[in-house]
Amino acid sequence: MKVYLNGVIVDEGAAFLPVNDRGILFGDGLFETIRAYGGRPFRLERHMARLREGCRTLRLAGIPGDEEVRRAIGELYAANVREGDAYVRITVTGGAFDGSRTLRRSGPPNVFIVVKPLEPYPEEYYSHGLRLTVSRIRRNATSPLVRVKTNNYLESLFARQEAVEAGFHDALFLNTYGHLAEATTSNIFLVSDGEVCTPHLECGVLPGITREAVLEICQDLEIPTETGFYTLDELFSAQEAFLTMSTGEIIPVREVDGSRLGESCPGPVTARLIQAFHELVKSPGPEI
């Protein structure tokens, strides 16, 4: 497999990071995960804009431009995938550790890109829905890092591991104020009386690219939406719920901690949004 590392396409076995990389030592860095449909990355410019905003938060400079990233993804797709959908990950690390235990860095970041065939989620997730549990871990809504897709993902991994060990598919986070936040790698939506609702960004959630697309689709379909501050009781009383993520698109939620959500899964609004999203990604042209 070929990968991109700091401006060069190389064999995977020849791509190395130094042992003193800040990403290894401190989890210093961030990443983007993108789904490419037939080689076309979904909303690459928006992913890159979020990546750059995260770099500004982390005081990171020197990442490649959008066109260089686009060319690299195209070359890697041709080398590693050739046809069908692909998984794309762009990773930025803090570069060499020079002794500074602040966000000051004396050298450039390390940037690598991986493109490989997409491994889709099981079809039963879409036909029967997910079973979630509420994690005992809370998202810190006041932290500037909650809106950055940082390389330190242990909190999410820990929450998902506990969920899987308890027999669930994934975990759902509340924030430190008790409001709904997000799942471990996705945003959450609920449908109440025909209105599509999702936690406000101030709840401590990542501004998901698929989340944004779903809100735009709702506007096009004239489905009312709201971003707000929701409790677990409001989730339990919803008629439908679903998760959104780049690789999995829209996945319905069947139940939370054993409580069934709505009468059918996926519900009618969720099914309509799934169909509309599929139509969006099939739109012609080099950009999606």
Image: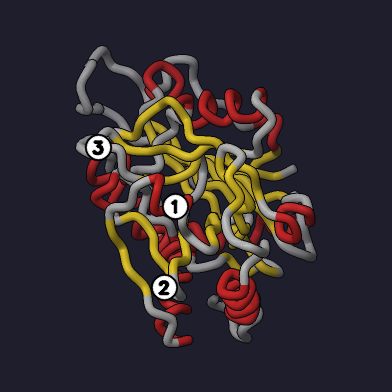
Q: Nearer the viewer, mark 3 or mark 1?
A: 1
Q: Is residue 115 left or right of residue 208?
A: right
Name the residue: 64% across, 43% down.
131
From this view, report whether residue 281 is shown above or below residue 161: below
Which of the labelled discs sits on residue 235, or is there none? Answer: 1
Placement of the C terminus among the 4 image quadrants = bottom right
Pointer 2: what residue? 195
Pointer 3: what residue? 177
Name the residue: 34% across, 55% down.
199
Q: CA distance from mark 1 to mark 2?
A: 13 Å
- Indicate the amino acid at tag 3: Tyr
Residue 78 at what x, y percent from top left?
Answer: 73, 61
- Indicate the amino acid at tag 1: Leu
Mark 2 is surrounded, within 10 Å at the Cα level, by few (under 14), some (14 to 19) or many (20 or more) other residues, namely: some
Placement of the N terminus among the 4 image quadrants = top right
Work out whether residue 112 can be spotted: yes
Which of disc 2 and disc 1 is earlier in sequence?
2
Which of the labelled discs sits on residue 282, or is there none? Answer: none
Q: Is residue 224 left or right of residue 260?
A: left
